[in-house]
Image (spheres, rainbow, N blue to C red):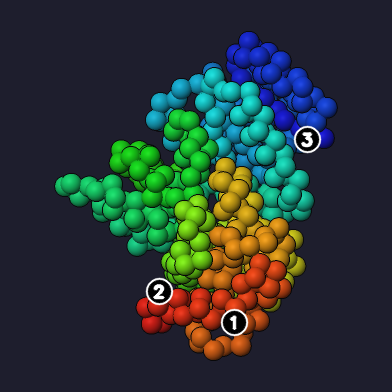
Amino acid sequence: MQRILFVDDEAKLLGGLRRMLHGMRDEWQMEFVENGPDALQRLAQQPFDVVVSDMRMPGMDGSELLWQVRERCPGTVRIVLSGQCDRREVLKAVGPAHQFLTKPCDSSALKELLARACRLRDRMTAPGPKELVSRVDAIAVTPESLEALTGELAAPAPRLERMADIIAAEPGMAVRILQLVNSGFYGSPQSTVDPRQAARLLGQERLRELTESSQAFVAPPMTGVLAERAIEIVEHSRAVAAVARRIAEVESEDPAIIANAAWGGLLHDVGVLVLMQQARDPYADLWATFTGDVPCIIEQENRMFDADHAAVGAYLLALWGLPDSVVTITALHHAPSDSDDRQFTALTAVHAADVLTRMESPDSPGRQCLLDHGYLDRIGKSERVSAWTTLCQEVLPEGAAT
């Protein structure tokens, strides 16, 4: 049974939550406390899967409490449920909180959020990767992108569309902006996989505040081989996004499939960036010997972390409230046969684009080995690989594939 701890200094609100969630008592073990110190005492006595905290509390506020939870119980899902907060309070919550809900909260929305968090905890069974991902408070971004965004904000006439373009080309920025919009940090949650749309919804002033804060975007804490590999991963992700979009445009007229292919492609390897950032020394040793053998590195990741980068990335995206469509793509981009697909989907486009952009030579036998031919046969698309290879060559400039 999942254990959920609610923290709020208003006894009436806790009573309302108790009544609202009474019907879930057979599925969740719930406790209710009125301040941060009491919450930490309960956490010291026994673990909780989810902590739901108010922001405005006397003494220890919600941000401080959740930072403490992060350090003491790193695998715990951390959610803010608070009244209208000013921008300063929202910025304080960006680092320690995985998701943010505003009071008054619809009972069905709260139940669904908590149910999703509990399902997520069940999906990632190994404690090591669960704690590793839960500690992430920002994904490192390339210095060039951070400089470009800062420069645009400092321009005499900043352009929101230019900011959106910068964010949409940087996986670390894109996933952060999508988290803030999908999880409701700034008002009602808006379901979107498009970081450009998310940036527009936030607006120029909020983007300025996020960029100037120390919570939203961070430069990579990496040196040597990891710094080089991180840049390669970002470039590869951009290439996959472009190729996956083009494949989807040719194979489907569904705008949702095209959008999911493009942005799922940008985020598909975010788990690599997480492992580089959170497990620098062991992952540096692993990547120092990487020769392009993806199955081999996945095997080594599982041996080292009890999870591979696809599972790690999918857990982070789900933890941060991103739509299931991109979570599934991230989880299964190396193993689409594990999906229920019976026809072309955005996952198909990202899987093919990931493989086709990875090899330098169009005729490389390694490329064919990486393709999930059983999956392509099942959805009736095996004969399209040659056409997709041509699309890849058309989309990417010479030498862009990594």
In this picture, residue 128 sits left or right of residue 246: right
Task: Name the N-terminal-most of marks 2 and 1.
Answer: 1
The amino acid type found where label 2 is placed reads Val
Q: CA distance from mark 1 to mark 3?
A: 43 Å
Task: Name the N-terminal-most of marks 2 and 3.
Answer: 3
Is 157 located above or below residue 24 in the figure?
below
Res. 382 image quadrant: bottom right
Residue topped by disc 1 = 367
Q: Residues within 10 Å of mark 3 (few under 14, many from 20)?
A: some
For the residues bearing labels 2 and 3, Cβ distance under 8 angstroms: no
Percent coordinates x, y for residue 270 in the rendering = 55, 59
Residue topped by disc 2 = 395
The amino acid type found where label 3 is placed reads Gln
Q: Nearer the viewer, mark 1 or mark 3?
A: 1
Q: Secondary structure at mark 3?
A: strand
Judge whether residue 227 can be spotted in this image: no
Instruction: Decide which of 362, 144 is in the foreground and name it.
Output: 362
Residue topped by disc 3 = 2
Percent coordinates x, y for residue 206 in the rendering = 35, 38
Q: CA distance from mark 2 to mark 1?
A: 18 Å
The amino acid type found where label 1 is placed reads Arg
Res. 97 image quadrant: top right
